[in-house]
Amino acid sequence: MTLNRKGYTTVAMDYGVLYLDDKTKVHLYGTPGRERFDFMWEILSNGGIGMILLLDNTRPNPIKDLQFFINAFKDLIKTAPLVIGVTKTDIKPTPSTETYAALLEKFEMRPPIFEIDSREKEDVKRLVLALLFSIDPGLEG
């Protein structure tokens, strides 16, 4: 299915550095969301200070995807903030961020939720900054 959707996919952990300004950089670690790579999820959760979850709105049931990942990462989410980026809303605008927020409210969760284009540096930066502000609301933006 993945090959039909995109020409390549991540099959290992991703790593990158996002420079927020001349003095501040954030190390980012990522993993594929497919369940067959779940052995990596625990590795990356250990020592994680937060989680950014990207949801693909064009998937058959992104609400079910959200529920799955909330459950899969429940231990990390208990101790670290969560930020959600919803991708491809230009292709499929529903579910809306309000729909995701209403579902998360049932779990007594109120994470920041953004519509983003994950290819755009500023959109990714917005997610990371939201995560950092969730960790320390006193940070300067």
Image (cartoon, grey):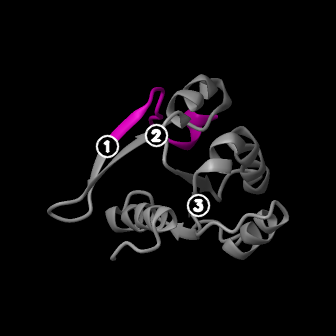
Q: Is residue 54 part of the magenta span, yes or no?
A: no
Q: Residue at x 63, y 27 (%)?
A: 38
Q: Is residue 26 left or right of residue 105?
A: left
- Residue 86 is drawn in which quadrant? bottom right
* Furthest residue toward left: 22
Query: Relative to residue 7, is residue 102 depicted above or below?
Result: below
Disc 2 marks a residue whose amino acid type is Gly
Q: Is residue 3 part of the magenta span, yes or no?
A: yes
Q: Residues within 10 Å of mark 1 (few under 14, many from 20)?
A: few
Labels 3 and 1: the sequence-earlier one: 1
Res. 27 mark:
none
Disc 3 marks a residue whose amino acid type is Ile
Secondary-structure class at tag 2: strand
Q: Residues within 10 Å of mark 2 (few under 14, many from 20)?
A: some
User: What is the tally of numbered marks visible in this picture?
Assistant: 3
Res. 16 mark:
1
Q: Residues within 10 Å of mark 3 (few under 14, many from 20)?
A: many
Q: Position of residue 69 (x, y in %)?
A: 70, 45
Q: Which residues are magenta?
A: 1-15
Disc 1 marks a residue whose amino acid type is Gly
Res. 30 mark:
2
Q: Which residue is mark 3?
A: 84
Instruction: Evaluate if marks 2 and 1 touch, with contact meaning CB atoms under 8 Å apart.
Output: yes
